[in-house]
Image (tube, rainbow, N blue to C red):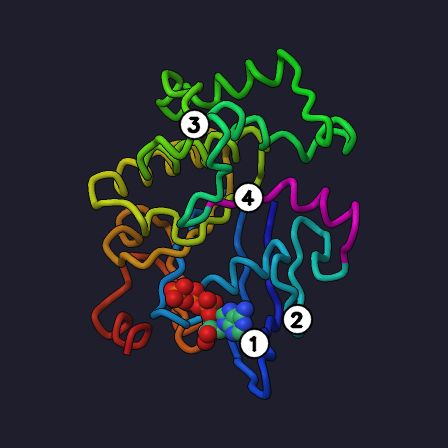
Amino acid sequence: MALVIEQLTMIYHTDKKKEQALQDIHLEIRPGEFVGILGRSGAGKSTLIRCINQLVKPTTGRVNWNGREMTKLSGKALRQARREMGMIFQQFHLIPRLTALQNCVLGCFGYRPFWKNVLGIISAQEKEQAMAALERVGIGHLAHKRVDQLSGGQQQRVAIARVMMQKPKLLLGDEPVASLDPVTSRQVMDLIKEIHHSEQMTTILNLHDVNLALTYCDRIIGLSQGHKVYDGSPEQVTDRVLERIYA
Ligand SMILES: Nc1ncnc2c1ncn2[C@@H]1O[C@H](COP(=O)(O)OP(=O)(O)OP(=O)(O)O)[C@@H](O)[C@H]1O
């Protein structure tokens, strides 16, 4: 499934001020790509990721996902399109008082009737699927522990297992390893890459660590002050390119 972004511009309006976060971004992401977005703080990386699944509504421009114009969708149609887009975050976004298994089950809520979610009815089959997802990410033994008692790396594994329950075609990551130590960061990146391959999930991650991005990603997009200043292979990211992105 292809993702096509055209003329994307985002201006945040705060009290008396306008903040231009993205300016005329064009991108075509091919199915199965593993893309890293680099840029200084404030370059627009999170905004770009969030405009894809419409957590942020762009000021102008189009985001076309598999033939559907995301920017025009609302209500049920938007929820259905979003189901195909999993998201992981720097701060994991888990529910602290719930166990790993309970958090993981939440990943399939997008496929269930609303009333079942409200009543919190979970079938044996859903529990089994969640257990399998936790085992897949290497933390089956922690299924019944509250997530606020887990390490950062373990919490991110729960978040990844939850995303897998959603069966997305596109994985979006907003600094998914920024809170983790270097060794754990690599372990989580290995896991994301492995799942990307096995599930054939197009993957787009904001990464602040250039070395990680160049090691794991097949394509690098560089943003600077809301503009795309690089789009190419990691091998071609020279010092000059890095200067353009980070200067
Ligand atoms: N909700 C908001 N309201 C107003 N301005 C915002 C908002 N979110 C982001 N911005 C501004 O938009 C610009 C881009 O922010 P964004 O968070 O996308 O950058 P980023 O590259 O992800 O930065 P970081 O690496 O620090 O997370 C910044 O100037 C930021 O201050």
- Does 184 sit left or right of 30 as displayed? left
Question: Residue 170, labelled with which disc?
Answer: 4
Q: Earlier in the sequence, mark 2 or mark 3?
A: 2
- The kind of residue on which mark 1 rests is Asp
Relative image position of residue 228 (x, y in whole percent): 45, 72
Packing grade of label 1 (10 A; few <14, some 14-19, many >=20) is: some
Tell me the kind of residue under disc 4: Leu
Q: Give me the residue at 35% from left, 33% from top.
A: 191
Residue 238 on image: x %, y %: 23, 67
Tell me which segment is drawn in magenta: 73-88
Viewer-proximal residue among 169 and 238:
169
Residue ranking furthest to the top: 124
Q: Which residue is mark 2?
A: 61
Figure check: 226 above or below 50: below
Q: Is residue 227 visible?
A: no
- Whichever of labels 1 and 3 marks the residue nearer the N terminus, that label is 1
Considering the numbered disc 2 on the image, is that residue within a helix, a strand or a loop?
Answer: strand
